[in-house]
Image (spheres, grey):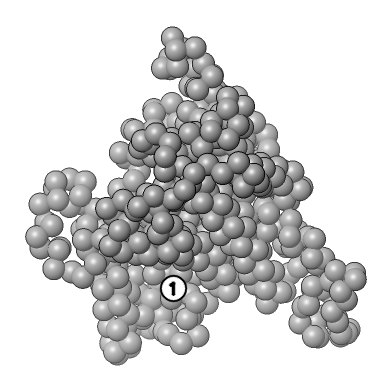
Amino acid sequence: MDLFYIRWLLHDELVIIQPIISKENYYMFKKTELIFISFMLFSMFFGAGNLIFPAFLGRSAGVEVWLSLAGFIITAVGLPILGVITVAKAGSFHNLATRVHPLFALIFPLLIYVSIGPGLAIPRAGTIAFEMGLKPFLPQTLMDKPSMLLGYTVVFFALTLWLSLNPSKLVDRFGKLLTPLLLLMIVVIFTKSMITPIGSFSSPSETYKETPFFQGFLDGYLTMDALAALVFGIVVANTIRAKGVQDPKQLSKYMSFAGIGAGILLASIYGILSYLGASSASLGQPENGAQVLTIVMNELFGQTGILMLGLLFTLACLCVCIGLIISCSQYFSETLSFISYKGWAVVLAIVSMIVANMGLTQILSVSVPILGAIYPVAVVLITLGLINNYISTRVYFFATLFTGVFSLVETVNYTFLGNSLDSLLGVVPLYDVGVGWVLPAVVGGLVGLVVPVTTRKLSNV
C-alpha cells in the first residue's frame, strides 16, 4: 500500500488531514469545498422557525437579550451540531441507534423520519412559505381561499421535488447559490439597522426577567433541530463520500468540520435576529416572531421590506424542504429499496403537499405530541454517542428506555388526559420547565452502569 505525507499548504487552501493515509482512500479537500458543505448544512437547518424564534426571543428578553441568547445558542446550535458530530463518530444514524437495540434501530429512525419529514416539518414549511411569502400580497377576498394554498403548494413542492432529484448537486445549489443569497439578505438587513437604528432595548417580559439564560435555553430546545441533525447526517456523509472520501475517520473529521462551520453561521445569524427583535421594543405589540420581523422590515425598508421578508421566508422554507426530502428519500430508498430514491422523492413531495393543505393548526395538533415524545430520546442518544468510548451498550439501553417511558407518559398526560397527572409528574425535578426527562435519563444511565450482564452483550458499533 502506498503511503505518503500530507502537509498544510496555506496558499493552496488544503485542509489538514491525517499525517499518513492510504492513497486509495485519499482526497484533498480544499477549504472552499468545506465552506460550501457547511453552507449547505446551514441552509438545511435554517427554516422558518429559525427566523422566528430568535427574533421573538430578542423582543421578549429586551436588555437581557445577550444572556438569553447564550442559553438559546447552547440548545439551538450546540445540540444540532453535536448531533452531526455524533452521527459522524458512529458512522451513521443506524449504527448509533443499534447501540440501544436492533429493534430500536428500526423503529426510532422511522419515527423521526416520518415526523420530521412528511408528517410535520416539510408540510409545515410549505404552509409557512405561503403565509409569509404570498398571502400578505393577495387581495383580502383571496387570502383565505383554500385554492390559493393549493395552487401555491403545487408550485412550491414541484420546485422542491425538481431540486431534490439530484442530491449530488446539493452543494452547488445550496452552498454556492441559495445560502449565500440568504446570508446576503440578512447582512443587508443588519447593515440597514446599524445605519438607521430601530430603537433601544426595553425591560424583559415576565418569563425572561427572573431566569433569562434558562428561558433562552428552553426556547432553543424547542426548535427541535437536534432531530434534524440526526436526519441530515446521511446527506452530509453522502455528499462527502461523493467527493472520494471513503475512510471512516476522514469522513468523521470532515462531517465534524461541516457541522462546526454551520454552527458558527447559525449562531451569528441568531445574534443578528435577536438584536433586531430587541431593537423593536417601541414598535407595536407583536404576538410572535413572524410579526416581530414584519414590523422590523416595515420600519427599515417600508413596503419593500415586506417583500424582502417574504422572499427570505420562502428561501429558508425551500432549503429546509429540499434537505428533508433528500434525507428522507435516501433513508427510505435504503431501508425500503423496492422504491428508488427518485420514486421516494416523488412520493414524499406529493404526501407533503397533501398534508400541507390540511392547514398548519391541524398539522401541529397531530404531530407535535409525537415530536415531544421522541425528542428527549434523541437528545439522550446524541449525548451518549459523544461519550461512547466510556460506556457500555447497557447504558444506552436503560438511559433510552427510562427517557422514552417518561416522555411517553408525559405526552399521553398532555394529549389525552388533560394534564391530570401533573400532580404526580410534578415531583420530578425540572418537569415544570419541560425537561423532566433529564432525571429518568440519568437514573437509567446509572442503572446501566451497575446492572450485571445477564444477556448477550450487543455489539458496540
Instruction: Please give the name of the residue rendered at 39% of the width and 34% of the height, measured from the top-left corner.
Output: 284
* Secondary-structure class at tag 1: helix
Bin the neighbour count of mark 1 within 10 Å (Cα to Cα): few under 14, some 14-19, many 20 and up: some
Coordinates of residue 439 in the picture (x, y in percent): 26, 73
Instruction: Please give the name of the residue rendered at 48% of the width and 81% of the height, measured from the top-left corner.
Output: 388
| Image vertical order of residue 255 relative to residue 290, above or below | below
Coordinates of residue 443 in the picture (x, y in percent): 26, 78
As shown in the figure, which amino acid type bears the numbered disc 1? Answer: Thr
Instruction: Please give the name of the residue rendered at 41% of the width and 84% of the height, measured from the top-left corner.
Output: 392
Pick the quarter of the image with the N terminus.
bottom right
Q: How many badges with numbers are in the image?
A: 1
Q: Is residue 394 left or right of residue 80?
A: left
Coordinates of residue 171 in the picture (x, y in percent): 73, 51
| Image vertical order of residue 388 relative to residue 338, above or below | below
Q: Residue furthest top?
A: 141
Foreground pick, 446 / 308 = 308
Residue at numbered disc 1: 383
| Image vertical order of residue 384 relative to residue 416, above or below | below
Foreground pick, 428 / 183 = 183
Q: Is residue 324 visible?
A: no
Residue 24, quarter of the rendered image: bottom right
Q: Is residue 410 visible?
A: yes
Residue 124, quarter of the rendered image: top left
Foreground pick, 99 / 89 = 89
Residue 359, quarter of the rendered image: top left
Coordinates of residue 28 in the picture (x, y in percent): 83, 70
Instruction: Please give the name of the residue rendered at 45% of the width and 39% of the height, measured from the top-left corner.
Output: 292
